[in-house]
Image: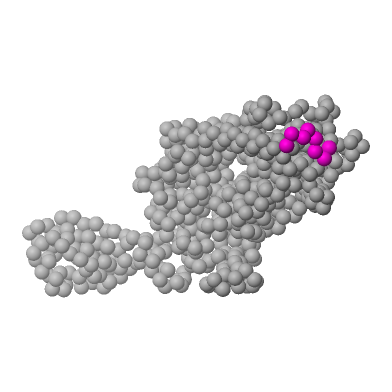
Amino acid sequence: MSIIRLDNVVKEFRSPKRHPGLTGAVRTLFTRQYDIKQAVAGISFSLDAGELVGYLGENGAGKSTTIKLLTGILVPTSGQIEVAGLVPWKARERNTLNIGVVFGQRSQLWWDLPLIESFRLVAKMYRVERHRYERNLDRFRELLGLDEFLTVPVRQLSLGQRMRSDLVAAMLYNPRINYLDEPTIGLDVLAKEQVRIFIEEMNREQGATIVLTTHDLGDFERLCRRVLLIDRGKLLYDGSLERLQAEYAPHRLLVVQFVPEAIARAQAEVLGAAPMIDMPGVEIMKQEEGKVWLRFDPTATPAPALIASIAARYPISDLAIAEPDLEPVIRQIYAERRVRV
Amino acid sequence: MSRLWLNLAFQVLRILLRVCLLKVIWTAVYAGQGVVDGVALGQVIAFITLAQLQVWVMSPLVADYIRERVREGKIALDLARPAPFLGQLLAHQLGGTASLLPFVLLAVPLAFELGGLVSPASLAAGLLYLVSFVLGYFVSVLIGLVIGLVGFWTLQTQGVIAIYLYVSQFFTGALVPLGFFPAWLRRVADLLPFQAQAFIPLSLYMGNVAPKEIPRALGVQLVWVVVLIAIAWLMWRRAIRRVVIQGG
């Protein structure tokens, strides 16, 4: 059962055409020409209740615009949007009861008040009854370690504390859907991990549907089974992270460490393009001090076969298989700017 | 919190300072004559003192608030709330005014002492003043709202706010009582909403309105409230349709 549905959604922004220079500035004042920019250029997808989806794209690709369309803050130029049975911009206020929003760059908390007051206000606004409020807050305190700063004015919080607090404010009333726009931006490793665990728990425990945008690919690898890749307002890819990787970066990396006695022989043969690498889709990336990095295509040469063939000839002391980083994959997709679904 | 209180304390100081200066100037203008144009010096000073206090209490905080929310893109968060935006604005305004109250209580006795504030002309005048004050308050807030909403188109309303504050003070008679205006300027003042904002309640307080004129005075205020609500509502309907959130 889909809870979010977008059907060919377009959002155009119109801005007055600016002419360069001083005379241009005067001309700008008196002419009525507009530049039209399509921030979202015909996007369709639907999400099922309980999904945790990564929404991925470069700066200005249209991610935040999509989220603002979904919250009902922006009115689409054309196309249909439905969120939990409502058209967000038509029933904006009713829609807000179903959704929680975190804009990582802006806080929804009250700057001068102690943090706990913001939570109380949010609970009042969303009519969370006392019992549920206390239960939720207890759970969040435990998950995010809020106790040390609950009574501190928001403006004195560190970025990590503020982000955790914003997440709490967005989830305090158990919304069915959460839009998290860059919730890990600027956070250190520890804070990032806390935020990820929290998002994971909310999705698992409360069955919240979560749409996550981030520039941190680690967030996706850790949290999302499904990613939507958007570029210049268009959807480039919709599917699992594994498939994305398989299609764009099918290679794996095998790191082999030879036992000391075998190093000299192995290296000589490797350097001399010996039969060791005479298998389809295998190439040497680099080697040093008895260690060799091999790139291979598991569809052409399965990992067990490759390992067996090497181990048969040289004594191996250690080995590891690594998946390629997601980042070069994404870079490659942007470079190609086309869909290969 | 303390920054807020300090800020308010300075507002009180500023008003008292202005009241004192205006008192000195008007005393000098009268040059020893008790009555000019049928208006007594004490009346002028009392009027101006009360006008300054009133302008302060009636400050339309919404205008600046909208500007800030739109410019910083926080409007996106406001619109994702289950409360209507205009309601949020009203809450902000009333809350801001309420936070002034302790300082008003502090400022009023000082205004009696330093400025020459007098008690209302009569008990009835005092009660009428309260009614008229509330109407004037909403005229002021609604004008501020309309100015603030302009920010949805221009993103910048500081200049308009500055002009408004100056023009409204002038046409309210908070600097020079309207009685001293040349006839044509007085007619302009009568057509503007600023007299409904402050001049009418002030005149009622001073007992300057003839009894049979009272319904008309309150009526003018009420009409302005209705007209401004209509304007603000129409503007808001259009603003929300063309919201462009800054940044992100």
Q: Is residue A339 visible?
A: yes
Q: Nearer the viewer, residue B193 or B1?
A: B193
Q: Is residue B53 visible?
A: no
Q: Nearer the viewer, residue A56 or B122?
A: B122
> Which image quarter: residue B178?
top right
> Which image quarter: residue A256?
bottom left
Residue B198 among those drawn in magenta: no
Q: Is residue B233 above or below residue B138?
A: below
Q: Is residue A242 above or below residue B6?
A: below
Q: Residue furthest front?
A: B32
Q: Residue at x 64, y 37 (%)?
A: B21
| Left or right of B47 on screen, residue A104 | left
Residue B27, given in percent of the width and then of the height, sits at 71, 35
Q: Residue furthest right?
A: B212
Q: Residue at x 20, y 66 (%)?
A: A286
The rendered magenta stretch, by its main secondary structure, is classed as loop
In the image, the segment drawn in magenta is B31-38
